[in-house]
Image (cartoon, rainbow, N blue to C red):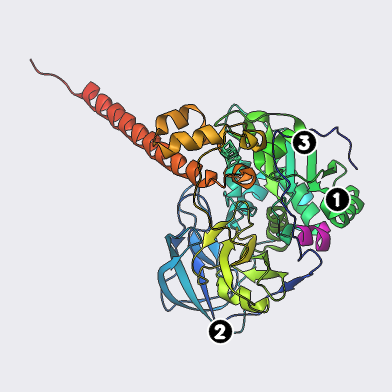
Amino acid sequence: MALNHIFHFYGGVHPREAKVASRAAIVSAPLLPQYTVPLAMHIGAPATPVVKAGDMVKRGQLIGQAAGFVSSNIHSPTSGKVKALDFCLGAAGTQLPCVLIEADGEDTPAEPLPPYPDWQNTEPDRLLKRVGEAGIVGMGGAAFPTPVKFTIPVGKYVDTLIINGVECEPCLTADHRLMLENPLKVLQGVAIAARILNVTNIVIAVEKNKLDAIMELAKLAPTVDPNIRIQPLEVRYPQGAEKQLIYTVTRRQVPSGGLPADVHCVVMNVGSAFALAEAVIDGKPLYERVTTVTGTPIASPGNWRFRVGTPFSEAIKLAGGTQGEVGKLISGGPMMGMAVYSQAVPIIKSTSGILLLSSEEVFQYTSKACLRCGRCNDACPMQLMPGILSTQIENERFDDAQNWNVMDCIECGCCAFICPAGRPLVQHMRRAKAEVGAKLRAQKAAEQKAAELEKKLSKTTIVK
Ligand code: SF4
Ligand code: SF4
């Protein structure tokens, strides 16, 4: 099962696991009368709508076409009528273009994409095309379009595929249940991804707090692809972060500002592997996913298969509603999730969890001065110095923060978790990253403009 010696990434913390929904089997959520389907469920350009108000659609029908290379197709979660093309609130607090679908209650499926049951003998290029057709994205949180991830830049090569079944975020159990209940489909998706990438070094990394899933995968892996290794890992947050996982499994270090392909790796989430198998073997586009609904105020925490466009409010209702005073609603887990201020936000392809915290659990603080204890330095998996960075950022010394590599911060929250002064370190890092990012974009735009001007001038004939 585990063949390689495993390394530990630097830093990290051990938050309380609180995976109370780990024994709750996945249940398919019932149909709703309406879905709010964002056209921007991924990193990159929002999809272009290919339907208009009044159109009738079927489940799985294309309603948004990828608008460029870094974008993704969007499919209808059920059959019904397009009520409107509108805007809706996203988890990040921004307005997103969306398609409102009034369900007809029939859930009539559209013609599936042509399935490839014989995927072992299907051309890798054809399989890669299917990844795009089905709208597959990274389902672990980032929602990076998978076709982009699978297109290795010229001059680089990949020799290792790492499947991320770590689910190191406390409270979340969706990936755990998916691996436990659907190991064959997950493994088939992994093997399809390996065929597309033409790699034979394939590792599914799972933390040891999911031993039942590890056993299931290990039992079936040889029947799907003998090259697949199941790698149990010690529990440690943020082991599921891409760079940390690559180091843990291969001891290769992604350079600052670099990509996994720089160290010959591709990392893919188990949810994406499952969706890939459905897309290739069943011809099913990605319009539903497993999401954990949990937290102290939730009456019945569990894992549901929700259609995209389901409002958080409906998911919370399905989990028995809330008891006691709710202090915070989070999209994702408690460490890297995003605080959301409205339950109207819809579930999208990357919604791994909906977490509610009680008002007693929400830590209200005023930022105190740094104690110079250095604990954050020990905890930071990117080997940054969060204490010093936060002081620079408080003083708006963003150039200094850039020189101290703030752009490498993965916003994991380990520093804030460990800080005895309760300093809002992640908020500081996000602020600096936004400031430095804006400066770099402006610089790039100015450089492009200068280059264009130079090109124009070089073509101009000067008459003397
Ligand atoms: S500075 Fe960034 S990467 Fe380092 S611990 Fe804090 S949030 Fe994580
Ligand atoms: S853990 Fe908090 S108090 Fe200690 S050095 Fe870091 S920022 Fe300062």
Q: Is mark 2 within 8 Å of ligand 1?
A: no
In the image, the segment drawn in magenta is 176-183
Could you tell me how far apart the alpha carbons at marks 1 and 2 are, in whole angstroms? 39 Å
The picture quadrant for ligand 1 comes to top right
Looking at the picture, which amino acid does disc 1 mark?
A: Val
Could you tell me how far apart the alpha carbons at marks 1 and 3 are, in whole angstroms? 22 Å
Quarter-wise, where is residue 395 in the image? Answer: top left
Disc 3 element = helix
Marks 1 and 3, the one that precedes in the sequence: 1
Quarter-wise, where is residue 384 in the image? Answer: top right
Residue 198 visible in the picture: no
Q: Position of residue 398 (x, y in %)?
A: 41, 34
Q: Which residue is mark 3?
A: 249
Q: Position of residue 203 (x, y in %)?
A: 79, 41
Q: Residues within 10 Å of mark 3 (few under 14, many from 20)?
A: many
Please give left or right for residue 31 compared with residue 2 in the image: left
Nearest to viewer (mark 1 / mark 3): 3
Q: Residue furthest top?
A: 464
Q: Camera-side residue: 274 or 387?
A: 387
Residue 242 visible in the picture: yes
Q: Residues within 10 Å of mark 2 (few under 14, many from 20)?
A: some
Q: Which residue is mark 2?
A: 104
